[in-house]
Image: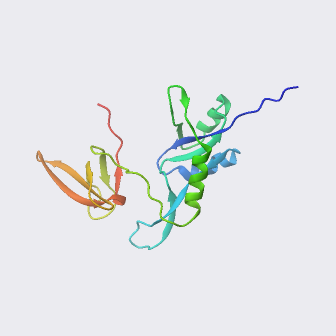
Amino acid sequence: MEIKRINRLWYVLHTKSRFETVVNDALVKKSFEVFLPKILVKSRRRDRRLMIRTPLFPGYLFLKTSVQSSEHVEILKTGGAVRLIGNKEGPIPVAAETIESLKIMVAGDNEVLTGARFKKGDPVTVVYGPFAGLTGTFVQYRGKARVVVTIEALKQFAAVDVKEEDVERLPKILS
């Protein structure tokens, strides 16, 4: 009798905004192998000076699965799960070496830097600080952790410098 061996690979799962931990916990309860890399960052709240653990890649986690239709459906039925990242042919696997490297990287308490969060032209909103509520278009990085946001008002542009961590990208509206 021949036993069929299921090949499980790592994939990236996109989640709803700020649902990474909820999805992680739900998938662990369903017996999936999941990896949610988290790093230590300063709390943004003004009344606290805490270091908190936050996802390294907001909105994403890693999942080891065979991507059979039954498992794929079970993953997507999880509250907060959006989709497995891929192309027309299906989900694209992530190398196991990449996952191991990420595990080593986030195991310590050293600062971990990631690539640029914004591209020129991205719609953004300021969520913290004196300019909270302001929406505009990302223009450029200006030195360490600074961005310039432009605002169209009265057919003129005004630009302000804000801290990168005070800005969030807005979804692009399809026209």
Q: Is residue 101 left or right of residue 159?
A: right
- Left or right, 48 with respect to 129, comes to right
Q: How many marks?
A: 0
Picture residue at 44% right of the left edge, 73% below the top: 48
Figure quadrant of the N terminus: top right
Residue 120, visible in the rendered structure: yes
Q: Quadrant of residue 167?
A: bottom left
Left or right of 132 on screen, residue 108:
right
The residue at 64%/42% (across/down) is: 64
* Picture coordinates of residue 145, whole percent (x, y): 33, 61
Q: Position of residue 67 (x, y in %)?
A: 64, 33
Asked if residue 46 is positioned above or below residue 55 in the image, the reply reads: below
List the single residue furthest toward the right: 1
Q: Residue at x 57, y 43 (%)?
A: 79
Q: How far from the left and from the top, in percent, is residue 170?
A: 34, 46
Camera-nearest residue between 61 and 127: 61
User: Residue 157: percent from the left, percent from the top?
Assistant: 14, 50
Q: Quadrant of the C terminus?
A: top left
Foreground of the two, 103 or 41: 103
Asked whether residue 136 is in view, the answer is: no
Structure colour scheme: rainbow
